[in-house]
Amino acid sequence: MLHLKNTTFIHWQTLEFSNTDIWVEEGPEGGIHFSKPEKPFTVKATLDCSGRFVTRSLANGHHHIYSALARGMPQPAKSPKNFHEKLQYVWWKLDHALDEQTIRYSALATAIAAARSGCTFIIDHHSSPQHTVGSLQIIADALEEGGLGHLLAYEITDRNGKEKAREALQETDRYLKNRQGLVGLHASFTLEDDTLAEALRLARNHHTGIHAHLAEDPVDQEMCLRQHGKRVVPRYAQMGFLELEKNIFVHAIHLDEYERELLRNSSSTIAVNYDSNLNNKVGIFNGSCLGQKVMLGTDGMHSDMFASARTAWFTGMNHEKLTPHTVYQRLRQVHHYLAGNKFSGDAENNLMVLDYDAPTPMDQKNFAGHFFYGINSSHVCHLIAQGRIVLKDRNHLLLDEKEILARARELAKKLWQQL
């Protein structure tokens, strides 16, 4: 058991402040105690948190770990004129070039970046068409080496042909037989009905949901109407996908009112990614009439949920009625999604210690103001994941950061040459 002494604890839901010691259980479902447990236990380590704030760590509602080595890569030979061309000239070329080593080091580099940003759990959506078999296990192993929890999915699509679609379905089936995860789907316009039917069958067989890109750009709706005579959400609804209980739909920007009603009346959760949407110029999410089941992700742009939340506030306030507290609730909605669907690895024993020396008073009433206008990832000094210290004084205790990042740079150069 880990002992955190002299803490100022901030409850992640009520934002109540309390001065207390904390005893932290180890394990994927571990809890925390605010008085010394009566049952016999061994203190494995003690952290003095005097003058620091302790609160629940963060989780990422939608990531693309496979893009970790893309930062700074050369521009494509042909400049994309729209979002569809950006997929074709950039991201679909990148995922085709991935192999075992680049997948592994993308995940290790992400584990480091996430930990430094106070994140202990990642929901990821992966694609590597030339190295599909075993790819999810590579990512799972790397994240676990870094101490992080995860919920993975492989992107199923017909854009690479039926053989590759079958490979993706088989990889999903194989992984879900032994691990928690979701059935990953690319945007609807790259999926035929027969492939979707197989994906739905897999989700039902494994008692899980889908993790799908939804109406990120108008092209998704336009091509769905042209090919299937209906919009994207009705297509999913008529096939039976909205009857699943653990779905994550990503982006959900270009929806009409009927589609919003369908999603609101389902148990699906929407993962929003403002930084990526701004970068791709696809539009701005509006959560009006979508209910409370909205969470935040990074979409592979970075691994910093503080930054994601800040963009969600500064951008979102101009497109819907938001308050800082509403956006903070969206940041924390991922915990409710994971707990409500009984996924493990994101229990109360995931904590971050913030070294935030505020120039003004901070308390329960104004915490949201400090969170969006002061606190950032640079204030994370210690990180506890599943009851274990992962980051201490901003140094990763489980991974050799210098070796990993040096090797990642070497692999990135080789990857870029293939593009």
Image: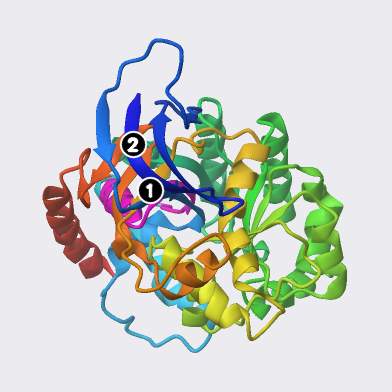
Please name the amino acid that badge 2 sits on: Leu
x then y, percent, for residue 416: 24, 68
Residue drawn at x 33%, y 41% is: 6
Residue 282 visible in rendering: no
Neighbour tally class for label 1: few under 14, some 14-19, many 20 plus, Cα within 10 Å? many
Residue drawn at x 11%, y 49% is: 403
Residue drawn at x 74%, y 54% is: 193
Please name the amino acid that badge 1 sits on: Met
x then y, percent, for residue 117: 35, 57
Please name which of the two marks, 1 or 2, marks the residue nearer to the observer: 2
* Display colour scheme: rainbow
Q: CA distance from mark 1 to mark 2?
A: 11 Å
Residue 245 is left or right of residue 50, and the answer is: right
Q: Nearer the viewer, residue 347 or 270?
A: 347
* Residue 372 to residue 278: above or below: above
Neighbour tally class for label 2: few under 14, some 14-19, many 20 plus, Cα within 10 Å? many
Residue placed under numbered mark 1 in the picture = 352
x then y, percent, for residue 191: 65, 58
Q: Earlier in the sequence, mark 1 or mark 2?
A: 2
Residue 28 is left or right of residue 401, and the answer is: right
Q: Which residues are magenta?
A: 102-129
Which part of the image, by quadrant, shows the N terminus? top left
Residue placed under numbered mark 2 in the picture = 4
Kind of element beneath mark 2: strand
